[in-house]
Image: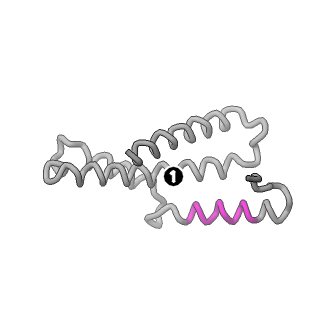
Amino acid sequence: MPLFARSLALNVLYNWARNVFKNPVNNAHDILMICCITKTMTGWNLLKVANTCRERCGGMGYLSHAKFGDYISVAHTCLTAEGDNRVLMTKIVKDYMTNMRNKTFKLPET
């Protein structure tokens, strides 16, 4: 169930990012970071879900009619050329740190 819940939460994130991209009124300076976060998180989740489903099916997961190979190949296209999205997440953290240092971004208070 956690993979399902994560997938639903990432769908909400994707829909929000799409709406921000369409109408960037208050978030114009954050569009690149929002898109990078959405890409990395959904790519990692797709790969994890596809691999987990294929593993749970046993040997039947390797058959072409199961389509898990197609989903795994689509997940690999979501990853960066270096093989992982860590590069994008590092860029996002660097951008947030720079914005906090320049006082253009403030962390939410708990």
Side of 110 relative to 57 (left or right)? right
Give, as a three-letter code, the residue at label 1.
Met
- Name the residue furthest right: 103
**Across the whole image, how many numbered discs are drawn on residues?**
1
Residue visible at 69% across and 46% down in the picture: 31
Side of 32 relative to 50 (left or right)? right
Residue visible at 86% across and 59% down in the picture: 103
Asked whether 52 or 95 is in front, the reply is: 52
Q: Position of residue 36 (x, y in %)?
A: 59, 52
Q: Is residue 30 above or below residue 26?
A: below
Residue visible at 58% across and 61% down in the picture: 89
Task: Identify the element where label 1 is drawn.
Answer: helix
Tell me the crowding category of disc 1: few under 14, some 14 to 19, or many 20 or more residues within 10 angstroms, Cα based. Answer: some
The N terminus, quarter of image: top left
Side of 41 relative to 64 (left or right)? right
Q: How is the image coloured?
A: one colour
Side of 43 relative to 17 (left or right)? left
Q: Position of residue 56 (x, y in %)?
A: 22, 51
Asked whether 81 or 66 is in front, the reply is: 66
Q: Position of residue 72 (x, y in %)?
A: 32, 51
Span shown in magenta: 87-97
Q: Position of residue 66 (x, y in %)?
A: 20, 42
- Identify the residue position indicated by label 1 in the image: 41
